[in-house]
Image (cartoon, rainbow, N blue to C red):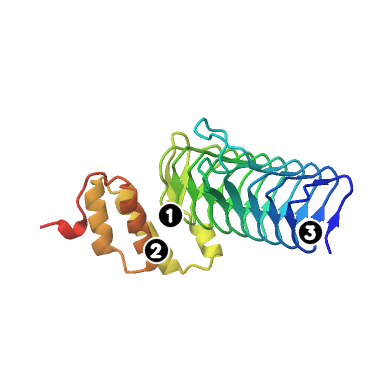
Amino acid sequence: MSTISPQAFVHPDAKIGENVTIAPFAYIDANVEIGDDCVIHPHVSILSGARIGKGNVFFDGCIISATPQDFRWKGEDSYVRIGDNNKIREHVIINRSIYPGGETKIGSYSFIMAQSHIGHDSSIGNWCVLGNAVKIAGSCKINNYTILSSNALVHENCEIGEWALIKGGCRVNNNVPPFVIMAHNPIEYYGVNAYILKKGRMEEDTISEIAKSYRHIYQSNTSAYNAYKRIMSDVAECKEKDAILKFLKSHNYKLAALPDIEEEN
């Protein structure tokens, strides 16, 4: 049975699961679905278009499914879809999509710290950590196990690969490949995210192969095309190597306008 404070506003058309706690002064709009075992603290606003899974905790003052901050949005119905077991801290704002039927997506088991902002149509993976006051613009993709330290800024249409770590205060203005640490402003490669990869129980040999891949890309003073070829031939086969090559190629990361390796004579 859910516990809903009489001082909260819950629209009669909202769908509320079992064992949900809604504190005083929370606001639950129409066209909202909240799964079982969620906890909604005071002054939380969950607005039209929110689709929320199980076991999420929303702390004081956060706004979920806020209307987009984008001139292209003309009032169309759209969504924020949140998975399970996330913690969304104080005064976080998550905007819904600017496209009819579109979604801003938050995965499961992520920790989004106070005063962070996630723009329209962005996607946050599973087991991510967003530090205090992280700002993510529209149409960004943050892959699984990524950490964005406090005050990091991610510009529109950027993708950050899995297991990446963005140091505090960085301005991410391009795509970031998986397994790396990025630091400084202007942002630059700082190394492989070895400590967190070990925490994730990745083998030392695999981490070494990842490091070898990025030495070819960032530290060998060669062309992007040659670095790509060296990774193909010099790095042991593993799914992490494949993930790096796929990411680089799919974004033309330092490989713009170059032919595929297979086309080389």
Q: Residues within 10 Å of mark 2 (few under 14, many from 20)?
A: some
User: Is there a contact, CB below 8 Å, between mark 3 and mark 1?
Assistant: no
The residue indicated by pointer 2 is 240
Query: Under tag 3, what secondary structure?
Result: loop
Which disc, if any, is residue 178?
1
For marks 3 and 2, the one nearer the N-term is 3
User: Is there a contact, CB below 8 Å, between mark 2 and mark 1?
Assistant: yes
Instruction: State the count of labels.
Output: 3
Vertical arrangement, residue 30 with respect to residue 21, above or below: above
Q: Residue at x 24, y 58 (%)?
A: 230
Q: CA distance from mark 2 to mark 1?
A: 9 Å
Where's residue 31, x and y in %?
68, 49
Which disc, if any, is residue 20?
3
**For this view, does 174 lie left or right of residue 264?**
right
Q: Residues within 10 Å of mark 1 (few under 14, many from 20)?
A: many
Quadrant containing the N terminus is: bottom right
Front in this rendered view, residue 204 or 49: 49
Tell me the mark number nearer the camera, choosing from 3 and 2.
Answer: 3
Tell me the mark number nearer the camera, choosing from 3 and 1.
Answer: 3
Q: The residue under label 1 is which amino acid type?
A: Pro
